[in-house]
Each structure stands twice: as C-alpha cells, then as structure tokens.
Image: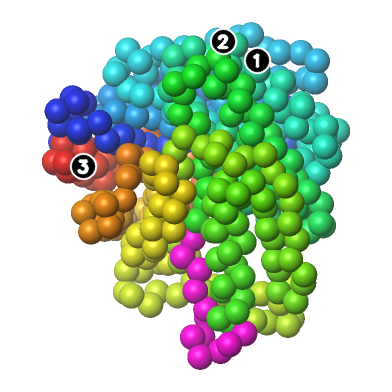
C-alpha cells in the first residue's frame, strides 16, 4: 500500500486526523532539565536532530495526508535564561506553524510537554506558588507572537508529571514528597486557568484544553476487596478527579487510608474541548511492601498482546475512558494513542482496533469526538526508555538518521481516506 495523501473537507468531514509529537523528544535542548537527566542524550545528541531537519520531517505529514498536527514548544529554547528570550527559537516555531498552514494542516500547539528550563526547575519548581506567574510570562510571550493557531494544549499529562516528579521521583524535580506533589498539581491547574484566559483574551475563538492521560484501571484480583478498593481510588484520582475539577472548581484527592483533601482551583468551565491520551490498561493490587501499598502490572488477558514497553493492548479501554470524559459536555479529541513495537502489522492492528472503538463510541453512544492523533510521527527518544520504544509511523535509523515509512504509515493514510466520521 503506497502513501497517497488526501486532505479535503469532503473526505474527512471536519474530523481531525493527525499525529502528535513533543519538541524535546525530537529536538532535545541544552537548556532543559531533562538534558542532564538521561545520559543517552549527552552521549548521542544527534538522535534528537529534528530542530535541524524539521522542514524535511514536516513533509512526512504532507505525505501521510493528515489534516492536523499536534506539536509542542520547547520552553527552554524560548527562554534559556530567566531574564532572556531567544527570538530565533520563537521564529523557528512560528515558521513550523506557517509551513503547516501552507500544507493545509491544522496546528495544535502544546505549551508544556514535561520539560522545563533548567533555571525554572531549580528556582521555581511547581510546588512553589511563584511558579504560576513565571509560567504565565512564558505564555504571554508565546501568545504575543503566535497568531495563526486555533487549538491549544496548555499542559500535557499534568498528573503524569506530578506522579513521576513528586511521588516516584523518577523525573525532574525528583522530589519524593506527596504533599508537595499535590501542591504542584494545584499550581499547574492554576497555571492552566491563567493560560486559558491569556489565550482567549488574544484569540476569542481559540479552542483550549489540557491533554489528560487516562488509563483503564482494574483490580488485579476481582475477588479481592482490597484490590477492588485500590482500583476504585486509582480511577478516581488518576482519571476522574481532573474531570470533576473542571466541572466544580474543586480538586478532591482521596488516597487509601487517608482523609479526603479538597482544593479550590479556578478551572471551572475553562475548557473548550478535552484532550484524552490513552494507551493501556493497568491491573492494581494491595501490597503492603510497596510504596503507598500499591502494586501495578500489565497482563495480556484478552489476547491482544503487550507492547515492547510491556503495556497491555486494550482497545476497549479507550471506549471506557471516552465515556467517562463525555460527562464534561465538551467535544473530545484523542490527543495521543499509539504503540511501541517494531512489528508494523501489530501497529496496524492497534490503529484499526482503536479507531473501531472511536467509531463504536460515536455510533452507539453519540459521543462528540472531533479528532484522533496517533503517537507518533517518527521514532524518537522515549522518556526513561531511550531509543527502543518504536512508536513512529516512520522508522528512524539512529545511526544514519534516515526516516523510512512503515506499513502502518500507509495504513493510516488509507484510514484517513476511507473512514467517514
């Protein structure tokens, strides 16, 4: 099957068919907190060379026939030092937007995708209240120069950022303190509220959201009441508490064997669509010897297999999380969904089954789903997993840096042409 791009209004009915990427995973940055976090980036900086090859890489979007592209700005390039801005870096991202528009591709711009300027994470980590104003200064700078973007993501997976950075301490700021983590989450949500207002003040018709990672969370043993209880707590905190906060303006946090905490967050109604990132199902059980007495694993229960990262392939879970997110009564967009595998046929099956789930949700439940973004365009650096997680529709040879389309790229191009949403 050859790549035959198509991008007409009549063929896609206004549905956003896209791919998603993050700046740091493609281009790195010498000024980012992550640059000194993983040795592979210092040993082989050339693997994140999209900053130089972006024009060539963007032609791959045109080849695929997507009508939308979600990408992020690398804050640490735009503001490498606390009191200085890099105008050339800003113009670089403006040029990307112009190229996309010339191709007829709708940009979806992510302001924050995990990484920070090193000075920020050292001096103003998210558990400090002044972090909000520092971030909003960056947002104002971006909004002042970007004038051709309709779709905005303020934060990618804020719960992953907080859990990994403050509960597990496996990413910056590596602060193992749950109370500080919750404070950081509250500040991030306040920052979203501020960014929402800044964007809408400049562009009243803009569509602004977060990209929320949602997982199908289930008890390890259905007969075990403690496993069932933990899975219930996990679903509420990880999937549901953000939805509730957008509806009520209150963030309610309840951990096992702890009293519920409630925080006022000014995000009620500050959502024009809701971005859902979905990858997998996770099985949870009570284990007193694990941190917070929680143990998690992946099991291939339904026979769809495990990805190269060991994640269970569970297409039905996409339906479950979308039905939960629909309670927000705003349009839904799947802002990330993908599989790490070197097997192109497995990648094709993954895409087909998850898009079947979307079609099922639209037809059976009438869910207002406006788009699907596959993760990712090309193979890239994967957080804490190096170069072995092959998510890309295009394969990258990390020795020669050559990009080659996989069979899944041709299949996705075919899906865009033939699925009528």
Give the camera-side residue of 361 and 301. Answer: 361
Q: Nearer the viewer, mark 2 or mark 3?
A: 3
Query: Is residue 145 shown left or right of residue 37?
Result: left
Give the camera-side residue of 68 and 383. Answer: 68
Position of residue 187 relative to residue 250, above or below, is above
Q: Quadrant of residue 118?
A: top right
Residue depicted at 32% across the width and 74% down the height: 303
Q: Which mark is residue 421?
A: 3
Residue 409 visible in the shown view: yes
Give the camera-side residue of 189 and 381. Answer: 189
Position of residue 178 relative to residue 303, above or below, is above
Query: x, y (%) of residue 257?
Result: 75, 76
**SS at mark 2 in the image:** helix
**Is the C-beta separation of discs 2 and 1 under 8 Å?**
yes
**SS at mark 1 in the image:** helix
**Residue of label 2:** 145
Categorize mark 3 by other alpha carbons within 10 Å: few (<14), some (14-19), many (20+): some
The span from disc 2 to disc 3 (Cα, nearest Å) is 34 Å
Q: Which mark is residue 72?
A: none
Q: Quadrant of residue 169?
A: bottom right
Name the quarter where the N terminus is drawn. Answer: top left
Label 1 vs 3, first from the N-terminus: 1
Query: x, y (%) of residue 363?
Result: 21, 54
The span from disc 1 to disc 3 (Cα, nearest Å) is 37 Å
Residue depicted at 78% across the width and 33% down the height: 131
Query: x, y (%) of residue 240?
Result: 55, 58
Query: Is residue 176 shown left or right of residue 353?
Result: right
Categorize mark 2 by other alpha carbons within 10 Å: few (<14), some (14-19), many (20+): few
Provide the residue span drawn in magenta.
215-226
**Residue of label 1:** 141
Name the quarter where the C terminus is drawn. Answer: top left
Q: Quadrant of residue 81?
A: top right
């Amino acid at each position: 099957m050859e790549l035959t791009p198509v991008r007409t209004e009549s063929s896609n009915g206004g549905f956003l068919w896209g791919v998603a990427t993050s700046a740091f995973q493609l281009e790195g940055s010498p000024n980012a907190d992550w640059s000194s976090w993983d040795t592979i980036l210092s040993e082989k900086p050339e693997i994140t060379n999209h900053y130089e090859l972006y024009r060539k890489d963007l032609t791959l979007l045109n080849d695929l026939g997507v009508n939308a592209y979600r990408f992020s700005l690398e804050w640490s390039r735009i503001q490498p030092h606390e009191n200085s801005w890099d105008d050339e870096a800003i113009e670089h991202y403006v040029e990307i937007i112009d190229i996309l528009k010339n191709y007829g591709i709708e940009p979806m711009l992510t302001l924050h995708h995990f990484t920070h300027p090193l000075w920020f994470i050292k001096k103003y980590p998210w558990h400090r209240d002044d972090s909000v104003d520092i971030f909003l200064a960056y947002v104002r700078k971006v909004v002042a120069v970007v004038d051709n973007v309709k779709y905005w993501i303020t934060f990618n997976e804020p719960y992953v950022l907080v859990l990994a950075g403050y509960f597990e301490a496996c990413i910056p700021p590596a602060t193992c303190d749950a109370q500080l983590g919750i404070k950081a989450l509250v500040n991030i949500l306040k920052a979203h509220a501020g960014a929402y207002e800044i964007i809408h003040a400049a562009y009243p018709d803009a569509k602004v959201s977060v990209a929320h990672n949602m997982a199908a969370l289930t008890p390890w043993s259905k007969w075990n009441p403690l496993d069932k209880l933990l899975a219930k707590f996990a679903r509420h905190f990880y999937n549901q508490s953000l939805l509730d906060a957008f509806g009520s303006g209150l963030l309610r946090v309840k951990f096992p064997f702890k009293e519920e905490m409630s925080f006022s967050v000014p995000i009620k109604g500050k959502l024009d669509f809701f971005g859902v990132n979905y990858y997998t199902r996770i099985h949870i059980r009570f284990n007193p010897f694990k941190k917070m007495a929680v143990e998690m694993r992946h099991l291939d229960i339904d026979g769809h297999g495990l990805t190269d990262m060991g994640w269970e392939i569970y297409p039905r879970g996409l339906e479950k999380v979308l039905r939960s997110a629909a309670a927000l009564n705003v349009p839904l967009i799947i802002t990330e969904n993908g599989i790490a595998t070197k097997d192109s046929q497995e990648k094709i099956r993954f895409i087909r089954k998850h898009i079947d789930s979307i079609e099922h949700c639209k037809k059976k439940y009438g869910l207002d789903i406006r788009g699907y973004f596959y993760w990712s365009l090309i193979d890239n650096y994967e957080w804490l997993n190096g170069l072995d997680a092959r998510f890309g529709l295009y394969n990258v040879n990390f020795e020669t840096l050559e990009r080659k389309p996989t069979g899944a790229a041709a299949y996705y191009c075919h899906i865009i042409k033939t699925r009528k949403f």
